[in-house]
Image (cartoon, rainbow, N blue to C red):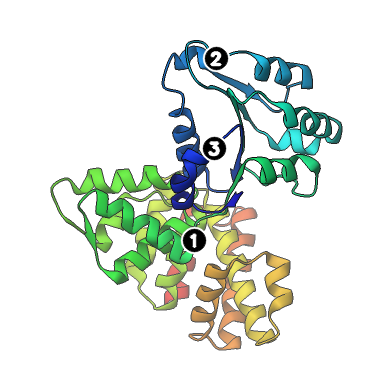
Amino acid sequence: MELNNFSDFKKNIKNIKSLILVYGQEKTIINKTIELVYDLITQFKEINVLIMDGENVSIESIINACETTPFMSEKRLIHIKNANYIFENNALSNELSKYLNNIPDTNILLLSSYSNVDKSGNLYKLFRTNGMVIEYKKLKGENLQEYIQNYLNKENKTITKSNLLYLTSELTLCNENIDLELKKLVDYLGDKKTVDKIDIDLILSKSIENNIFRLLDYITIKELDDAVMVYNQMILQGEEELMILSMIFRNYKIMYLLKIYGENYNDVVKKYNIRDFALKNYFKWIKKYELSDLKKNIKRCYEYDLKIKQGELNASIAVENLIIELCA
């Protein structure tokens, strides 16, 4: 059985027999899935749940664990984390797939990985045929919107469609634990029932990429005060001035290339590994600029970078002056 969302997993959890593989990029939901599997062991969990690390297991240690009888419980759980290492080891994965055809039905073997696993080998096929495989791809778009909406509903919080879209875009950029960020937001709201944009901006952790996009948004519409505010927030968060400058520089170069290539932009996307949400922002921004404007902005970035490195200007003042010029 192959599944790809948490709702389907919850519906099928009672169908788990002895084999379950959960993997993917969405750590939050992988952890929730693991918790529910752990809950299948209702007695003497400290004895009947064994956790192993796939980076340093042997076939002997796995077999010994799987052959151990549950202690005063119907089931025993063996959880191997970092299971991607097992799938990468052809000899180990082949030996394990042979053994698992005869795993005792009193034991559950759970393999988990926060990265993708090799689907071409016998081990993956065995889990798919005889057990349950759940892949959680990175939450985004409508799936992430639905997840956020359900989370807020459970907390008796409401949010408008536009703010839900904004929160979704912020969490798409966010490198933090999504549940942790949503919990921080709900805790901040307290008795307040409605999530406003200002709440999102005040509470959510901002990655440097996220903040650079906010900064460029304000620069593009010539909102100097807001642009300087974002820049100062980044400095307070410990970001280096030269790093901020280099990312502004990089984004203007990307805009320039996208403007030149027009509809034939795929080479630029591949070269700079541009994600979909970022591409939408670039296309929005370049509508505001002529090609000559982008060339001037690239030149400004280069000149300020040079002055900082040659010791002619203080980095913090230089980047703030650059932002002022870009907003002019």
The quarter of the rendered structure image containing the C terminus is: bottom left
Kindly identify the residue that appears in the image at 36 percent across and 71 percent down. Answer: 224
Give the Cα separation between the discs numbered 1 and 2.
40 Å
For marks 3 and 1 on the same chain, the one whose residue lies earlier in the sequence: 3
Residue receiving disc 2: 70
Q: Position of residue 170 (x, y in %)?
A: 41, 59
Kindly identify the residue that appears in the image at 16 percent across and 55 percent down. Answer: 193
Question: Label 1 near label 3: C-beta < 8 Å?
Answer: no
* Label 3 SS: loop
Kindly identify the residue that appears in the image at 50 percent across and 56 percent down. Answer: 139
Question: Label 2 near label 1: C-beta < 8 Å?
Answer: no
- Kindly identify which numbered label has been placed on residue 140: 1
Q: Is residue 145 above or below residue 124?
A: below
Badge 1 amino acid: Lys
- Kindly identify which numbered label has been placed on residue 16: 3
Q: Position of residue 204 (x, y in %)?
A: 36, 51
Q: Position of residue 277 (x, y in %)?
A: 52, 68
Give the Cα separation between the discs numbered 2 and 3.
17 Å
